[in-house]
Amino acid sequence: MNELENMVREDRFIDFRNVFRRNSRNDKFRSNLQQVYNRYSALSKKFFELNPDELNRLAFVVSAACVSRGLAMSQIRKILNLINSIKRNIDKSSNYDISKDRMKLKYMLAYITASHQGKIEPFMLIVSDDVIPKLTPENFPHFYDFVQAMVAYHKFLGGKD
């Protein structure tokens, strides 16, 4: 286990951010970050079973991977708008049909990944096959919290607007 993974596991996000800001362009750092991402990405298989701390760590690692690739918030604005719209619709109706939204999330993520040189790929790989197909109005708040945490950590790590 490398030092970056220890920082994540111990919730030392400020220490991680300091190291990240100094070394994000360093190839060895990127390799270590990729190893951390690879270990945490396995959590996507049990995404809806993750406790809040595990979900938070996963969001942090995915954000770090996206920021290291140069992802700007403006590049995922459509996804964020769709997710917020889904949340509003679920909040309005107790029997909301989320099936069209699942399909739209998948194809929008695929498009954004392709059109922005894979900068959002770490997020897409986590949610596309293991999370989005299982989204329901009941478990959507878990996904929503994950995305909100990712957005916050994107900013925290110095990601572009």
Image (cartoon, grey):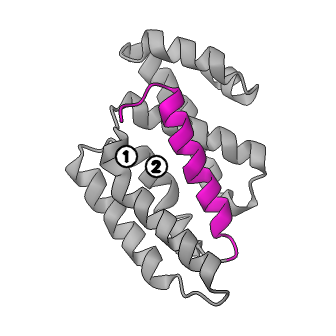
Q: Is residue 78 magenta?
A: no
- Point out the residue furthest to the top here: 22
- Point out the residue furthest to the bottom here: 95
Q: Nearer the viewer, residue 36 or 55?
A: 55
Q: Horizontal and vertical percent for residue 134?
A: 59, 73
| Mark drawn on residue 120 | 1
User: At label 2, which amino acid type do we have?
Assistant: Phe
* The N terminus sits in image quarter: top right
Q: Nearer the viewer, residue 84 or 104?
A: 84
Q: Is residue 57 above or below residue 3?
A: below
Q: Secondary structure at mark 1?
A: loop
Q: Would residue 61 appear left or right of 138 to someone viewing this image?
A: left
Q: Which residue appears at 50% of the width and 26% of the height?
A: 157
Name the residue beneath numbered marker 2. Answer: 123
Q: Horizontal and vertical percent for residue 98?
A: 53, 82
State the image quarter where residue 82 is shown.
bottom left
Q: Which residues are magenta?
A: 138-161
Q: Which residue appears at 66% of the width and 64% of the height?
A: 141
Would you say the residues marked 2 and 1 are in contact, meaning their CB atoms lie under 8 Å apart? yes
Q: CA distance from mark 2 to mark 1?
A: 6 Å
Q: Which residue appears at 46% of the width and 34% of the height?
A: 65
For residue 1, say whether it is visible: no
Q: Would residue 81 appear left or right of 156 to someone viewing this image?
A: left
Q: Nearer the viewer, residue 42 or 58?
A: 58
For residue 56, say whether it is visible: yes
Q: Is residue 157 magenta?
A: yes
Q: Secondary structure at mark 2?
A: helix
Within 10 angstroms of label 1, few (less than 14), some, or many (20 or more) residues? many
